[in-house]
Amino acid sequence: MRKMSIAVLAIGLALAVVSPTGAVRPPAQPVPCLYGFEWIHSFRFPLQADPHAAYSYIIVPKLPAHGIPVGFFVDAEFPYAAWFSWTIYGENADAVSLATDYKISPDAGSTNPFVNGNPVFTPNRHYRLLLLPPDIPPGKELAPSLADIPNQNMIPIPIHDSPTAIAYRVYQAFPGYKLGGSSGPTNTSFPSVYAVNYETGETLDCSQYNVVPPTIGRLPTDTPDVYNLYGTASANAPPGQDLRELVEGMRLLHVPEFAALQSKVGWQFAPQIDPALVTFTRPPRAPGADVSSVPPPDNCAGYLGALVDPRRIALIRLPHVASIFETATLAPNTTFPDNPQAAYISLTMYGAVVNTYQPDDPKSASLADSEFQRDETGGSTILVWPRDLPVREHEQLFTYARTQGWTLMRGGRVGPLTTANLLFRLKRPNDDYYGAYTPLVIEGVLVRSGVPCYFKGAAPGARWSEIENAADPMDYVASFQNLGNAAPQGVHCAGTAEVLDGSCLSRLEAYIEATGGKYFNPGDVPPP
């Protein structure tokens, strides 16, 4: 690999300009790139963000290979959050590069708070990234004064091949911080991204290299006034704010390059394998997918999804909820733990109607981490109720569910573009966690198989519903056989009466046992 020397950006160091009157004008400050922000607590297809997370985008058009040598410089503080990543999407919105939280090197004198054992509230938490085209022509050299940026913080960005997206995702911001892990008690700045001439270090006008228009985009100093609601009461959110957030997010769809990152028509029609069951499978990897590695381990998404009949109650059991990095009860001396099975887990209901995250409210359509309300065996049962459930049945059903210790979630709707789908996300699972959804190979050895991927070798654009065509679609469903007691499994109930008389629960228990598991299955129980 050609040795590259890098130069310090000349931020604020331009020569002073003398005006005609002889007065010295201060140098112009470089202007960072505008972001498109998808920070939402309400959601509807095609926007399927996790409402516990902040998604922020810069969209770069295809650039000529022989023009100005353009790269992108990220000047950032590590966020106050459970997990984050920078993902670069290239042709067909496929992920081509990835920088994950704990793998990023901090600046000298700073600490990466995402490394196991490091203090999560460390005040010195600065880092820099340099995004460079992988096809730097022979004879081109990088400006020498940024040579202190470590190689692992240099990320390929194929701006000469296709339009490119820079996606910054932050999950589960700490209490009191904005959804992007910024502001808050420490007044932490949001990352700034600059277009730069990588030969000279000169900061360029980013508006020439970013298609997010000023009518939609915002500077990193003007992030949405959206805070993480996890660990709070829904009443803390200003009335109507969730819908205003969604409207702003939907405006991004007017940018074609951003729309290319979203789910397409028909791709979110989940398979109906057995109408009596709620079957969780791995969808095909879609454009703009949030991936765990580059290249991804296979051609399936890294999350689990299931169709839920919007006309019926669904009862879902997770016998073991992964231990996670709990952010709701942090102490000043908290360090990033080295023993959780994952950094974060969530479950969200999507569909053709607007759903909202409202902590501790039965109308909420999302939950994460402690909101799973683990029982004494470490498991969780979730009751998803249909939106058209008669009002007279609400109190009876909700009271019964709470008495059982179950978590309540409002259902979605089917539309011409999508079914009503539940999605499980699991971030930063430990290598030895048997309940992670994707396969893991270390040094040529299969360490974890995860849930089988039906779409190996499938052409781009394969429909999720094609799993129905498998010889035995149940081979691709999460169960004790592939995830141990961490497998989510569910059934549809005929109605409220079947829930109240216990017969729906009995069918759920029988389904789990038929696949080798148990409804109550405490401890760590891997698949056979």
Image (cartoon, grey):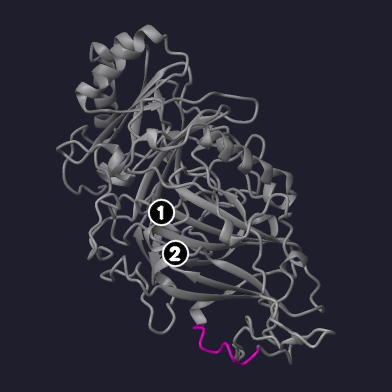
From the image, give the main secondary structure of the stretch colored magenta.
loop
x, y percent for residue 290: 52, 54
Q: Are marks 1 and 2 in contact (CB under 8 Å)?
A: yes
- Mark 2, residue position: 188
x, y percent for residue 408: 33, 27
Amino acid bearing label 1 = Tyr
Q: Residue furthest right?
A: 20
Compare residues 127 and 47 and report the one nearer the observer. Answer: 127
Mark positioned earlier in the residue sequence (1 or 2): 1
Which residue occupies 47% across, 55% down?
180
Please state the total of marks drawn on the protein image.
2
x, y percent for residue 36: 63, 53
Q: Is residue 222 above or below residue 273?
A: below
x, y percent for residue 430: 31, 60
Which residue occupies 33% across, 56% down?
343
Compare residues 377 and 77 and report the one nearer the observer. Answer: 77
SS assignment at label 1: loop
- Mark 1, residue position: 177
User: Was residue 368 drawn as part of the magenta stretch in this picture?
Assistant: no
Amino acid bearing label 2 = Thr
Asked where in the image residue 6 lies, by quadrant, the reply is bottom right
Bounds of the magenta segment = 143-150
